[in-house]
């Protein structure tokens, strides 16, 4: 679903690149997707695809535990890569991917598409202004939340077959050695869903926060406090909520606040930005665009210019390190 709806459709629509091949272990699904998106070459494995010398750049959307090995093969073959997040399950795994990209001076991007959201771009510009003119005073704290819900996916935007998902892919370990096996499914969800709001908080508040506090209960509901140089950002995280998707970030100032309301992950919509000063709320004007489309367009441009992506592998390893620290702290109390 994600590979077709969020990636294939957007790269196929970009006139600055050509989608020349698809690789999938399910032949019927590969054929159906290739027909839908006008792709002429179909390969049964990623190894076969990487043998095609016309392929210069690879987008990896697969089982999360198989992402790292496939990305490593692609980077070692000299291809630029955009992969879905999480990039890996441990910092050691992530570091091996970053080093592979560095060795060959490759563009390596991670799918934190919320950084490409046009509303988030407006929020960053407004935040820069407020920090400069001090009209709201200094930042005194922040609060983020993600309660899951309806993802906004539309069944009409992808094809699917009845084929079983096959085995045969190399899989990386799904967590650090110290993480009990019973907790790894929750850790997987944390990396897949909640790393988005952590990544976005870092984008707006500072790249390298410390973990000040962490509490994760048996259901995976989390309360995490990140310290951005003396500014505490409290994150409330829970997956599987019913109803609409609810996710966002509030940045509190001495004399006001900025509120960023994020759309559902697959909704073709922008984040909305609200400024609150003295009880008066102003919603910034917004348009209609899609973070996934903007991410695809940015990646094509980054490859052409050999430019560091907005969500690079080198930056995104911090999200893995934070997740490790959060879960270890929760275990040790």
Image (cartoon, rainbow, N blue to C red):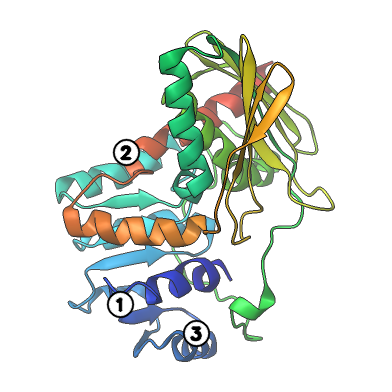
- Tell me what residue is drawn at x 35 percent, y 43 percent: 310
Q: Which mark is residue 49?
A: 1
- Give the image location of residue 307, x and y in percent: 22, 48
To which residue does mark 2 refer? 314
Marks 1 & 2, CB-CB < 8 Å contact: no
To which residue does mark 3 refer? 33
Closer to the chain start, of discs 3 and 1, is 3
Using residue 280 as the reference point, say whether residue 208 is left or right of it.
left
- Tell me what residue is drawn at x 45 percent, y 52 percent: 111
Q: Give the residue at the far right of this rendering.
A: 242
Using residue 17 as the reference point, say whether residue 184 is left or right of it.
right
Using residue 287 as the reference point, say whether residue 293 is left or right of it.
left
Closer-to-camera residue (197/330): 197
Closer to the chain start, of discs 3 and 2, is 3
Closer to the chain start, of discs 1 and 2, is 1
- Tell me what residue is drawn at x 51 percent, y 66 percent: 6
Q: Whole-Å distance between the Cαs marked 1 and 2?
A: 25 Å
């Amino acid at each position: 679903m994600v590979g077709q709806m969020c990636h294939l459709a957007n790269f196929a629509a970009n006139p600055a690149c050509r989608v020349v091949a698809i690789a999938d272990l399910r032949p019927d699904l590969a054929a159906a997707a290739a027909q839908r998106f006008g792709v002429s070459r179909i390969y049964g494995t990623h190894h076969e695809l990487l043998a095609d010398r016309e392929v210069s750049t690879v987008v990896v959307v697969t089982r999360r535990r198989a992402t790292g090995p496939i990305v490593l093969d692609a980077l070692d073959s000299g291809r630029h890569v955009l992969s879905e997040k999480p990039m890996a399950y441990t910092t050691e795994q992530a570091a091996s991917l970053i080093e592979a990209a560095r060795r060959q001076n490759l563009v390596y991007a991670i799918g934190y598409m919320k950084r490409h959201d046009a509303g988030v771009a407006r929020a960053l510009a407004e935040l820069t202004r407020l920090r400069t003119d001090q009209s709201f005073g200094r930042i005194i704290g922040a609060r983020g939340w993600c309660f899951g819900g309806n993802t906004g996916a539309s069944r009409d935007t992808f094809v699917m077959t009845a084929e079983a998902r096959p085995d045969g892919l190399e899989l990386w370990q799904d967590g650090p050695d110290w993480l009990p096996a019973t907790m790894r499914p929750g850790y997987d969800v944390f990396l897949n869903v909640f790393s988005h709001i952590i990544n976005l908080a870092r984008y707006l508040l500072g790249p390298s926060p410390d973990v000040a506090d962490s509490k994760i209960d048996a259901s995976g509901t989390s309360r995490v406090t990140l310290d951005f140089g003396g500014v505490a950002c409290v994150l409330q995280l829970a997956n599987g909520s019913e109803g609409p998707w609810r996710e966002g970030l509030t940045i509190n100032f001495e004399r006001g606040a900025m509120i960023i309301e994020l759309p559902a992950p697959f909704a073709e919509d922008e984040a909305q930005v609200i400024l609150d000063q003295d009880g008066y709320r102003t919603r910034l004007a917004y348009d209609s665009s899609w973070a996934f489309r903007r991410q695809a367009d940015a990646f094509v441009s980054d490859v052409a210019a050999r430019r560091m992506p907005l969500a690079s592998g080198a930056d995104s390893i911090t999200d893995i390190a934070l997740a490790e620290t959060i879960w270890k702290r929760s275990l040790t109390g």
